[in-house]
Structure formats: structure tokens, C-alpha cells
Amino acid sequence: MKEEIQRLKDLQDVDLKIGKIERAMAAGNEKLNSRKGSIEKQKAEIAEFEAKLAEGEARRRELESEVEDAQLMIKDRQNKLMKVQTNREYQSILKEIDDAKSANRQRDDELVRLLEQADYLQKKIDDQAALCAEEEAQYNEDSGQLEKEADELEAKMAKLLKTRATKAKKVKAALLRKYEQIREKRGGVAMVGVNRGVCHGCFMNVPPQLYNELLREDKLHACPTCNRLLYNLPDEEDESK
Ligand SMILES: [Zn+2]
């Protein structure tokens, strides 16, 4: 049984290394994805600003053409004013001119506001685009670096998977199944050491009787709390100390 326990320990060692590589790969991808997400968000914001800017420009052209039309109309009425016969007609045209002038003043005010808004939006767009370009450069650099790292990790992983297959073969089928079941349920850790009566899977004390039996290494025991398979972990091998 002592040998069987050692084989399972070996297998768990390899599995822990595999898990570490998997996490490193996932972390790299997550970092890259989050940067990509931030770039996309910024681009969407830029597009929104640009749409607002275009909307403002369209409104500006509309206003400018209205101002022009109104000016022509005013000129036309001013000419008419010289030829009118009655006072009533005169007053009516005068009012038309005043109204048109007042409407144009309002248009001018709006035009000023639109120009200010366009300046503001253009600045926002420029700033955001500069930030975006910086992040994109960083992204490309990171993704190149990450690709290199991923290649290395994949090479390591391929080796480990081979080692794992060899080690797994040495474990009895029924035991291996049990090991895999626990590993799946317990976050990739099926076999843990017990040091001074404490299970290193759940960090609870195992009953003294169980601990004594564990020291004999003549039977495979499971932690009554976390269900993981246990082996005795002497002080000098305990890396958490
Ligand atoms: Zn436990």
C-alpha cells in the first residue's frame, strides 16, 4: 500500500503542475481579453462622440441655410417697404422683418453653442484616440509576449501530460477512478498531506485515531471533512512551513 500511496502522490504532483500551467495560460488570456475589451469600449465611445459631432454639423448646416434664407427674405421685405402704400401694410412688413431678425439671432446663438460643442467633442475624440492607440500598441506587445510564453507553456504541458499518462498507468484502475472523482469535485486536488494531524486540503484536524493509522501507511485513508485521500506529511517535507 505504501507504494500505491507514493504513486498517487506522484500523480497528484504532476496534476498540480498541470493545473499551475493551465492557470498561467488562462491568466494570460484573461489579461489580453480585458485589454481588448477596454480598447473596444473606447472605440465605441469614440464612435458615439463622432456620431454626436456629425449630428451637430448637420444641424449647423441646416441653421446656416435657414439664416441665409431669412436674410434674403429680410432684404426682399426691405425692398418692398419702399413701395408700400398704406401704413397698415408698412407695419405688417416691418413686423415680418423684426420677427425674421429675431429668429436669426436665436439661430446665431445656437450656432455658437454648436461650435463650442464641436470643439469639445473633437478634443474628446482626439484624446480618446491617442489613449486608444497607446493601449493598442501595448496590446500588440503583450500579445506577442504572451504568444511566446504560451508556446513555452504548451511545450511544458505536453511533457507533463506524457509524464501524467505514465504515472496514471501505474495506479490501479479502481483507485485511479476514485482519485479522478475526488479531483473533479475538489478543485483539482484529490490527494493531500496531513501534517501534525491537520489535513492540508481543508486545514481541519483529522481524528487522532485516523492520524495514527495514517502513519502506518498500510491503508489508504480519506479525510472525514473534505473527503480527499491522505498521506502523512512529515515536518521536513511540509513546504507550507
Ligand atoms: Zn480534509
Image (cartoon, rainbow, N blue to C red):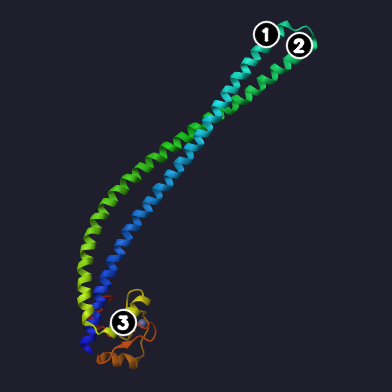
Q: Alpha-carbon neighbours of circle 2 within 10 Å: few (<14), some, or many (≥20)?
A: some
Q: Secondary structure at mark 1?
A: helix
- The reply to whether discs 2 and 3 touch (Cβ–Cβ < 8 Å) is no
Against 14, residue 69 (above or below) is above
Q: CA distance from mark 1 to mark 2?
A: 11 Å
Q: Which numbered disc, 1 or 3, marks the residue closer to the eye?
A: 3
Q: Amino acid at mark 1?
A: Asn
Q: Is residue 84 left or right of residue 188?
A: right
Q: Amino acid at mark 3?
A: Arg
Looking at the picture, tell me which residue is in the foreground, 125 or 65.
65
- Asked if the residue at label 1 sits under 8 Å from ligand 1, the reply is no
- Give residue 79's mark: 1
Q: Which residue is mark 2?
A: 90
Question: What residue is shown at x 48% (from left), y 39% (from top)?
Answer: 49
Q: Amino acid at mark 2?
A: Tyr
The percent position of residue 101, horizontal first and vertical second, equals 66, 19
Q: Quadrant of residue 223?
A: bottom left
Q: Which numbered disc, 2 or 3, marks the residue closer to the eye?
A: 3
Q: Secondary structure at mark 3?
A: helix
Earlier sequence position, callout 1 versus callout 3? 1
Quadrant location, the N terminus: bottom left
Q: Which residue is mark 3?
A: 177
Earlier sequence position, callout 2 versus callout 3? 2
